[in-house]
Image (tube, grey):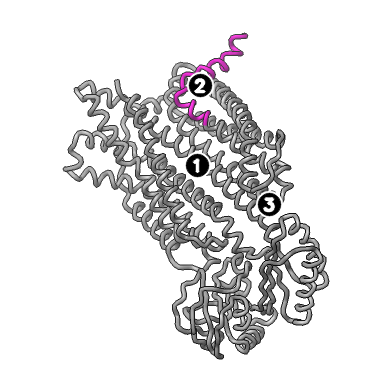
Amino acid sequence: MRNAVFFYPKLAAANLKKNRRTYGPYLLTTILCASIYYILRSLSLNPGLRQEFGGAAAHSMLQMGGDVSCFFIVLFLFYINNFLMKQRNKEFALYNILGMGKKHIAKTVAFEFLYSYGITVVGGLAAGILLDKLAFLGAVKLMHMEIKLGFFLAPAAVVHVLFLFAVAFLLIYLRFVWKLHIMNPTELLRESRAGEREPKAKWMLAVLGFVLLGAGYLIALRKQDPIEAIPNFMIASLLVILATYLIFTTGSVALLKLLKKNKHFYYQTNHFISLSGLMYRMKQNAMGLASICIMSTMVLVMISTTGSLMMEADQMMKQRYPYDFNCEIDEQEPERQQALLAELHALQQEEGVPVTEEVSYRYLDFGVERNGSQFDVPDNAYMAPCILMLVPIDDYNAVTGAQKTLQDGEVLVHTKRLHWTEPTLTLYGKTYTVKEHVKEYPKNGDTVANISDYLYLVCSESEFESIYATQKEAYGELASEKSFYYGFDTSAGETKQDAFRPVIRSLFDRYDFTCESHLAEKATFTGLFSGMFFIGISLGLLFTVATVLMIYYKQLSEGYEDQERFQILQKVGMSHKEVKKAIHSQILTVFFLPPIMAGIHLAVAFPILKRIVEMIGFQRSNLFLYVTLICFGVFLLFYVCVYLYTAKTYYKIVKR
């Protein structure tokens, strides 16, 4: 009786030990997933991170990263378990034929899942807790915060890990029980011995895949308004993902058939053997190749975008908050505006805040609908695809030190995101002559924060008032008011600047204005971008590990399937050297299709990705290009290393 009680746990342990070549990498990966998930949850709960300036933004980003990784981990565990159980179908069928009932098999596998769960959570939590402090120090370093020593354990993060993996393993086990219930062991053994039929090239589905891919590429490449960029990117991504699966599942078979028809290529020993093997298994491996391609693209997009944003964070911060203090007030009452300016000057002297540079100017900005060089009232003033910003010529000269002159009907133009070459522009039916394209324009952080395209204009005083009156009439209650901007830099230290912020706030109630401090906003800004970068690294690591594991199990499953075939070929005279050449030919024929396709996806997505990062203030498109190319180069090198290792593993399996 006692032996019966311990029979299933012992058998489960023996099964895991016997299948350690397949379960070892899997358990190491689940441990890594559990540790990364714990770290993300722990950092989002760490009071030392949340209480600092910028910690709230980082906390939100880390919390979002934990939610995304949670969803991905469950899908990843389902996908990899499918590989594992597929390798053991013959084993379960044999157990059933030899007299072990399906209930007994289910009990044995239940203990296997319990062991896997225990190893995962214990190993993952141990690694996560040990590495959590290192991750915290890294996050603090990225955010330029004060490093605080001490040990922090997040019980809630531990519960998150225990619950997530318990639910994931339970769902996977229930799926296995269902498949076991409908399994016919005799047919399974017969099918495992019978060869798979040669798949047919489904040309219609292949054409559909390329049509969807073309549609996704067109959406990504076409010129579009900034407001449309993000939703269009999501639509294009979905089309490309669906197209990738269709192309790999149908187009790969069609590619192999075309290669087979090429007599000069096909009738070579290594190509003949490799194509024959690939032809009969492409149907089952195409989904894996497509998944590797999608995972590779995700890794490249996340690392390149978050890395570029992190490298450019300081420059973006200077553009968003160009001065140490940036104040704005409606210019409807010039007397109140001048009174505010006088009080600010008085407070600067009273509090000992020396001013090293200051600017002040009037401006007007409002949304428009652009059609070439013509600008009209948009359908939705709140979601206008383009914004015009106007500054009177006297204010422009005072800020820039220029000595420009303008007549009525003439404007100066300055552009950043927009490409403008038109000699004239028409606003609300009136045509203006572009006298000059100027390189300098008064700094204003709000223009960087807005996702719409901006066109900066300088006009005469009379035109400034005329355009203001016209847009007031055209927009009604949604019309913009003239604004007065005052920004100043100071040589005071950070402590003094931080103390001066509440002093300025004391004027808010009386003057109804806004004032942003570069120092105060820098922490939030850095926290946001640091959180994005940390999530990019974490999820990039998860996706990379998933990609490697998919490649490993793909090669492993193919190796076991080809083992008998290559052994027969070696028995009839095929040398080890020829076996190696056939293996390399077989792997190279399709192995590098995923990174090549991922590189094409990334190249096509680059313009819309550049557009998206520009909307949040990223200006150096060349830097983004270089970072993207470096990421792709490093990933390709890493992929080659994985290829060399998996090809070696494959060869060890199939050789005698």
Is 160 or 330 nearer to us in this picture? 330
CA gap, disc 2 and disc 1: 25 Å
- For disc 2, the marked residue is 16
Is 379 or 619 nearer to us in this picture? 619
In the rendered structure, which amino acid carries the disc numbered 2?
Answer: Leu
Q: Is residue 378 visible?
A: no
- For disc 3, the marked residue is 54
Residue 183 on the magenta span? no
- For disc 1, the marked residue is 543
Q: First in sequence: mark 3 or mark 2?
A: 2
Question: On the rendered structure, is 644 left or right of 403?
Answer: left
Q: Residue 96's spot in the image, x, y percent?
A: 47, 21
In the rendered structure, which amino acid carries the disc numbered 1?
Answer: Phe
Q: First in sequence: mark 2 or mark 1?
A: 2
| Residue segment shown in magenta | 1-28
Q: Residue 472's spot in the image, x, y percent?
A: 66, 84
CA gap, disc 1 and disc 3: 27 Å
